[in-house]
């Protein structure tokens, strides 16, 4: 087993432990045991529990940014073009991309649970998620709302409106059982997620059109 493999196994074991027990409840002993790697390796690779938690959050940022890199390219082009309709369409694409990431299987449930836990009960490491993901994508949506509304939605209001947009996605992803029971769905398949997305884009259209 090479060093990179050992580090990766520890990191993904950490996701499982942090998802189940939170930062305070997880132990380096359990993380190492579940990865079948000597506990001293956590100190060697990460410097301890806080270090491996920091690495886990940084990895979430890297994974999501890699999976959404196309959005940044499209965003730069739309802002440069100052095309209002293109801005509206891109807001919906941003919503669709994140909704499918959060409700799909491209990101592990453990990784998503660690994100939701840190988002709802921030630790000292919250800045990793805030600076790496939350602030950049809130600003992206705010700027697109400003452009799509021809300036009638201010950047400050756009940032405010971005909160419920993303929060809905988090609820849809973290409360699957409740939503399936309420909607009488057996599971979250593509038709179900598409229905959630349709609900969200109607809100985007209403928000922009209400500022005419």
Image (tube, grey):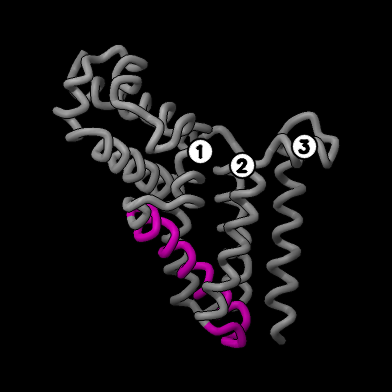
Reply above or below: 86 against 70: below
Point 44% across, 47% down: residue: 118
For mark 3, give the secondary structure.
helix
Circle 2 is placed at which residue position? 174
Q: Kindly identify which numbered label has been placed on residue 113.
A: 1
Sequence-wise first label, 1 or 2: 1
Question: Please, which residue is most extreme toward the right here?
Answer: 184
Total residue callouts: 3
Mark 2 → mark 3, Cα distance in angstroms = 12 Å
Q: Tell me the magenta residue range.
A: 128-154
Q: Are marks 1 and 2 in contact (CB under 8 Å)?
A: yes
Q: Which mark is residue 180?
A: 3
Q: Tell me residue 114's x, y (percent).
A: 45, 39
Mark 2 secondary-structure assignment: helix
Q: Residue furthest left?
A: 44
Say which quadrant the C terminus sits in: bottom right
Q: Is residue 75 above or below residue 6?
A: below
Q: What secondary structure do most residues of the magenta stretch adopt?
A: helix
CA separation, marks 1 and 2? 8 Å
Q: Residues within 10 Å of mark 1 (few under 14, many from 20)?
A: some
Q: Earlier in the sequence, mark 2 or mark 3?
A: 2
Residue 32: x, y in percent?
29, 19
Q: Please tell me which residue is depicted at 75% across the width and 54% down the height of the picture.
A: 198
């Amino acid at each position: 087993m090479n060093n990179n493999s050992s580090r990766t196994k520890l990191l993904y074991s950490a996701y499982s432990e942090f998802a189940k027990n939170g930062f305070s409840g997880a132990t380096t002993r359990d993380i190492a045991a579940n990865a079948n790697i000597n506990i001293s390796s956590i100190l060697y690779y990460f410097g301890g529990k806080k270090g491996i938690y920091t690495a886990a959050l940084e990895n979430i940022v890297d994974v999501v940014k890699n999976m959404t890199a196309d959005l940044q390219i499209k965003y730069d082009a739309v802002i440069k073009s100052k095309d209002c309709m293109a801005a509206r369409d891109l807001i919906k694409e941003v919503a669709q991309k994140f909704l499918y990431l959060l409700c799909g299987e491209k990101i592990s449930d453990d990784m998503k649970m660690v994100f939701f836990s840190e988002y709802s009960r921030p630790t000292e490491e919250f800045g990793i998620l805030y600076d790496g993901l939350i602030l950049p994508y809130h600003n992206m949506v705010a700027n697109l709302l400003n452009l799509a509304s021809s300036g009638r939605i201010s950047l400050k209001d756009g940032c405010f409106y971005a909160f419920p947009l993303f929060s809905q996605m988090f609820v849809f992803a973290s409360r699957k059982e409740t939503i399936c029971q309420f909607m009488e769905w057996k599971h979250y398949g593509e038709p179900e997620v598409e229905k959630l997305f349709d609900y969200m884009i109607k809100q985007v259209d209403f928000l922009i059109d209400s500022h005419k």
